[in-house]
Image: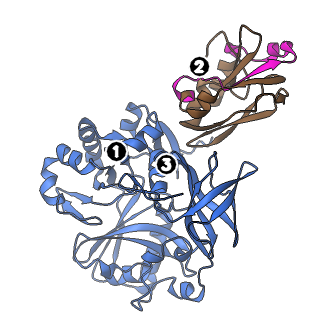
Amino acid sequence: MTQTALRTTPLNAAHRVLGAKMVDFAGWDMPLHYGSQIEEHHRVRRDAGMFDVSHMLAVDVRGRDASAFLQRVLANDVARLGVAGKALYSCLLNDAGGVLDDLIAYRLGGDRFRLVVNAGTAAKDCAWLLAQRDRRAVAVTIEPRRDLAIIAVQGPRARDKTWDALPALRAATEPLAHFQAVEVDEMLVARTGYTGEDGFEILLRAGRAAGLWRALQERGVTPAGLGARDTLRLEAGMNLYGQDMDETVTPLESGLAWTVALGDGRDFVGRRALEAKPATRQLLGLALLDKGVMRNRQRVRCTAGPGEITSGGFSPTLNRSIALARLPGAAAPGEEVAVEVRENWLRAKVVKPPFVRHGKILVKF
Amino acid sequence: MMIPENLKYTRSHEWVKTEADGTVSVGVTFHAQEQLGDVVFIQNPEVGRQVKRGEECGVIESVKAAADIYAPLSGEVVAANQEVADKPERVNQDPYAAWMFRIKPDRPAELAALLDAAAYQKLAESEKH
C-alpha cells in the first residue's frame, strides 16, 4: 500500500461515523459502501439514496468569450444551452478525437458556465482548458472550485425527501425539468444524476455539506457508496470514464454519437479527426444468459469478430450479470455472443442500453 | 473479527469443520466475505469429484471481484450446498453456517496441517493492514 496521503472530501468524517468501507478512488479516500452495496443499490431504485461526489471538480468558466470558447473545446454545443439553468452532457476531445473526459456543462446565466468533471482527470482537464484558452488569447476566466462539495440525491423519492430536508428549495426546484438547474440559497441544484433515477445533484460550499448530509439522512435518505453508484450507472447504460472510454477511443465508438453536435458546421477540437475516421466499433450492452459474472477486459466473440467488455458486473435489479462492451460495427442487439469468463465461453445476448431506467427493466433476453 | 475456535482454516480463507460422520464442511471466513463485499454467485464442485489439497474447486464472485475456492483437504466431494448456490447472500449473512461443499477426506491427517483459530487470526489481521 502506498503511503501517499489520500485526499478527503468535506464529508469524510461523516462516512467514517457511518462505518463506511473506504477505498482509494483516483487518490481520494471515498466510501465504497456502508455495509451492503446491493441494499444501497435497491434503496436508490426504490426510494432515495445519497452519494458524496465531492471528489468531482466544478470548474467555472466565465467571461465575454466563455460561450465561444466552450463551443470550441466541447464536442457538444453549448449553444443548445439557450437560457440560464440548462445543462448539457459533453465529451472533451483531443485533436485526434480521443476522449479526454466527459462532463456536464451548466449555463449559470449570462456568460457564466460551470463544468463538472471527473476526479481522476480534473488536473489534466484544467491544464488542457488553460492551454486551449491561452492559445487563443480569449477573454475567459477558468476557475477550479475545490471550495465546493457535491451531494447527489437519487431515487424516485429523492426530490420529495430533499424538499423535506430543505423546504426553502422547493419553490425554485420543483419546476426544474430533467437536465435543468437553478442557483438558490448559494447552492446550485440540478435535476441530473448518474443512476437512471430522478433526483438532484447539489453543489454547495464545503462547509455546508455535512449539515445537508445530516438533514437528508434524518429524512430517510440512505447513504450509498461508490459501489452502488457503479452498478446503478451500469444498469442505466452510462459510461464510466477510464473504463468505457479514454483517449484511445472516440465518442462515436463509445455510444456517445448523440452528444457530438456535427450538424451545425461548428469547428470544435477533434472534429476533423472524427470526420476523417468513421467508427468501426460501437459500445453496446450484454446480458449474460449463463451463470457467472462478466468482468472488465474479458474477451467477446461475435459473428462479426472480436470485442471486449469495458464494464462488467452484477446487476442487482436484473439479478444477473450485465456489461458494456466494445463490439464490431456489424454487431446488433438480439445477437447471441460468447464471453470468456474465467476460461469458459459463456453465452450472452447483445442489448441496447439502458438496462434499467426509473426502476423499470428495459431489456429483453 | 469473528473466528470460531472449533474450526480449522486455510491461508486462502476457507474454514473447515469436521462433521460427526467424518466428512468435512468447507466455507469461506467472515474476513473473506468482508473483503469480497456482497456475494452474488457461487460455483461449487460437482459431487463425486476427486480433489487434491490446494486444488481450485469452486468460484465465489461478489459485486467487486471473483475468488477461487481451494480444496483444503484431498478427498471426494460428497455434497454441495444448493441452498447457498441459490442464495449467495447467505455467505455474507452467516459465513460459518453457509457451507459450500463437503469432502470425505482421503487422509484425515491433513487436517492437522491447517491453521487453528489463533494462527488464522494473525493471518487475517496482517492482511487488513
* Secondary structure type for disc 3: loop
Indicate the colour of chain A: blue
Q: CA distance from mark 3 to mark 1?
A: 14 Å
Q: Is residue A246 visible?
A: no
Pointer 3: residues within 10 angstroms few (<14), some, or many (20+)? some
Q: Which disc number belongs to residue A46?
A: 1
Please, what is the three-letter code of the amino acid marked with disc 3? Leu
In the image, are marks 2 and 1 on the same chain? no
In the rendered image, the vertical position of residue A347 relative to residue B94, given as above or below: below
Tag on residue A318? Answer: 3
Let me know if marks 3 and 1 both belong to one chain: yes
A260 or A60, nearer to the observer: A260
Q: Is there one chain holding both mark 3 and mark 2?
A: no
Q: Examine the rendered structure and indicate whether residue A292 appears above or below residue A71.
A: above
The C terminus of chain A, quarter of image:
bottom right
From the viewer's perspective, tell me whether residue A205 is left or right of residue A229. left
The range drawn in magenta is B91-119
Chain in brown in the render: B
Q: Residue at x 12, y 57 (%)?
A: A171
Considering depth in this image, is A12 or A345 the residue closer to the camera? A345
Q: Tell me the quarter of the picture where residue A113 sits.
A: bottom left
